[in-house]
């Protein structure tokens, strides 16, 4: 086969490979070019985080507005301290909003839902949620129910 | 009795010396400074033989494996009422595991055996030694382009395999079994991570490509220059490549996805 034809076919082959990688990046893994969005950090203290994990989502009214960065134990209060980064364009979360841990579906992963308060001030970088609601523990719920308390 | 022990010892020495020879061989191939002017056309020709001609088997098997994953996944997931998770199941299986591994196995069978037979015949007909007589280094002229071609073609083939497989899974899942297309892609996108899943899969396929090409060219170069020798070298290429790929896959998976 002529050298030129080989060159063209191999070139097409490499282009097909790059296109396939691009497809995996954009369509399959949902990588969007503006993933390096600017965020700000807020905190919440929970008595029980249940199965919450870092990289989980933070949502408001069902819309994802941020991600969970880290979960650590506060050694003085024995509470879990959750650090979450919220997209900067959502900068008007009322300061008396509460953070609630919910489960998506019956067996789905857990996420933080922000239920909106009424205050005019909004949460800023480094602030902590005033009120939180811990993860619903199915076992505790059932044992409370069974023992009639 | 002593004879048996001696035979066992000889076997061990043979294995170790063969590892040593293959290492020196690899160093000889990669150590030479590549000359772009003469090396590039040779590489291109091998990329055509190793990569482009393997495309058909890769695409067809990728399509069918994706379709089977779609069918099997749908049957299992519909028991739990979560057919929509079929997208992430297909994508994660293909991108992390089946893409690199099955491509490498097919590659060893399709391209690796051909490389071994070709180089083995060159050796048997003394083309390699006559090259040396003419002052052409066969490692650089014959072996290096084939090794590099395998190394480059393998990740490209694996990525194409994954994409075709996902498309096949979509054909079965969405078009045939009626999973909602939005949740098919949406679930997939929310669970597949580009760096953790896609790039780790690509790294796997690069490693497999390197190992398969190395085994293939070494077996060809090291074979006994008879027709029986060539045939046993070709068999060894396929067997050793498959074993190496499956073993390395476990190690790489443990390193990439294991929690330790």
Image: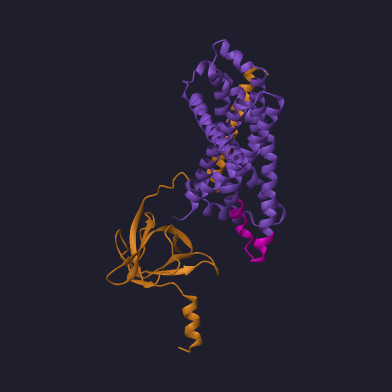
Q: Residue furthest left?
A: A76
Residue A93 is left or right of residue B36, and the answer is left
- In the picture, residue B160 is in which quadrant? top right
Residue A146 is left or right of residue B163, and the answer is left
Q: Residue furthest top?
A: B134
Does B30 sit above or below residue B127? below
Does B69 sit above or below residue B3? below
Q: Residue at x 48, y 80 (%)?
A: A141
The magenta stretch spans residue B77: yes
Residue B134: where, in percent of width, then height?
A: 57, 10
The magenta stretch spans residue B147: no
Residue A92: where, in percent of width, then height?
A: 36, 61
Residue B243: where, in percent of width, then height?
A: 60, 42
Q: The chain coloured purple carries which letter?
A: B
- Does the magenta stretch mainly form a helix, a strand or a loop? helix
- Picture colour for chain A: orange
Does B118 sit above or below residue A57? above
Depth check: B12 or A105 in front? B12
> What colour-coding does the image apply?
by chain
Depth check: B100 or A63 in front? B100
Depth check: B81 or B232 in front? B232
Pick the quarter of the image with the C terminus of chain B: bottom left
Q: Would residue A100 be visible to someone looking at this image? A: yes
Q: Residue at x 53, y 35 (%)?
A: B16
Pick the quarter of the image with the N terminus of chain B: top right
Q: Residue at x 63, y 32 (%)?
A: B112
Give, as a single range, the part of the protein colored magenta: B75-90
Residue B120: where, in percent of width, then height?
A: 65, 25
Q: Would residue A19 be visible to someone looking at this image? A: no
Does A119 sit above or below residue B26? below
């Amino acid at each position: 086969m002529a050298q030129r034809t080989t060159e063209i076919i191999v070139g097409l082959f490499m282009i097909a490979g790059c296109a396939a990688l691009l497809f995996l990046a954009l369509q399959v893994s949902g990588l969007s070019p503006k993933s390096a969005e600017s965020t700000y950090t807020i905190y919440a203290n929970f008595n029980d985080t249940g199965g919450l994990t870092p990289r989980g989502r933070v949502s408001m009214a069902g819309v994802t507005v941020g991600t969970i960065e880290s979960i650590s134990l506060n050694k003085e209060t024995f509470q879990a301290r959750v650090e979450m980064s919220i997209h900067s364009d959502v900068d008007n979360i009322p300061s008396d909003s509460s953070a609630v841990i919910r489960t998506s579906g019956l067996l789905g992963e857990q996420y933080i839902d922000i239920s909106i308060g009424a205050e005019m001030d909004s949460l800023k970088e480094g602030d902590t949620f005033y009120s939180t609601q811990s993860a619903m523990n199915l076992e505790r719920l059932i044992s409370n129910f069974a023992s009639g308390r | 009795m002593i004879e048996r022990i001696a035979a066992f010892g000889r076997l061990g020495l043979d294995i170790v010396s063969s590892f040593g020879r293959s290492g020196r061989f690899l160093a000889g191939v990669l150590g030479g400074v590549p000359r772009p002017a003469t090396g590039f056309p040779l590489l291109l020709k091998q990329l055509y033989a190793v990569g482009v001609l393997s495309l058909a088997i890769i695409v067809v098997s990728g399509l069918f494996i994706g379709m089977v994953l779609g069918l099997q996944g749908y049957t299992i997931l519909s028991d739990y009422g979560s057919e929509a998770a079929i997208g992430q199941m297909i994508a994660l299986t293909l991108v992390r595991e089946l893409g690199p591994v099955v491509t490498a196995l097919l590659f060893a069978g399709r391209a690796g055996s051909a490389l071994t037979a070709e180089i083995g015949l060159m050796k048997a007909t003394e083309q390699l030694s006559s090259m040396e007589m003419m002052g052409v280094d066969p490692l650089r002229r014959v072996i290096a382009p084939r090794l590099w071609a395998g190394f480059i073609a393998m990740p490209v083939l694996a990525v194409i395999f994954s994409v075709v497989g996902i498309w096949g899974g979509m054909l079965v899942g969405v078009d045939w079994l009626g999973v909602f297309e939005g949740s098919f892609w949406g679930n997939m996108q929310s669970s597949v991570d580009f760096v953790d899943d896609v790039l780790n899969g690509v790294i796997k396929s690069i490693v497999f490509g390197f190992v398969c090409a190395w085994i293939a060219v070494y077996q060809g170069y090291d074979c006994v220059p008879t027709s029986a020798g060539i045939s046993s070298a070709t068999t060894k290429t396929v067997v050793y490549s498959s074993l190496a790929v499956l073993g390395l896959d476990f190690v790489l998976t443990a390193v990439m996805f294991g929690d330790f």
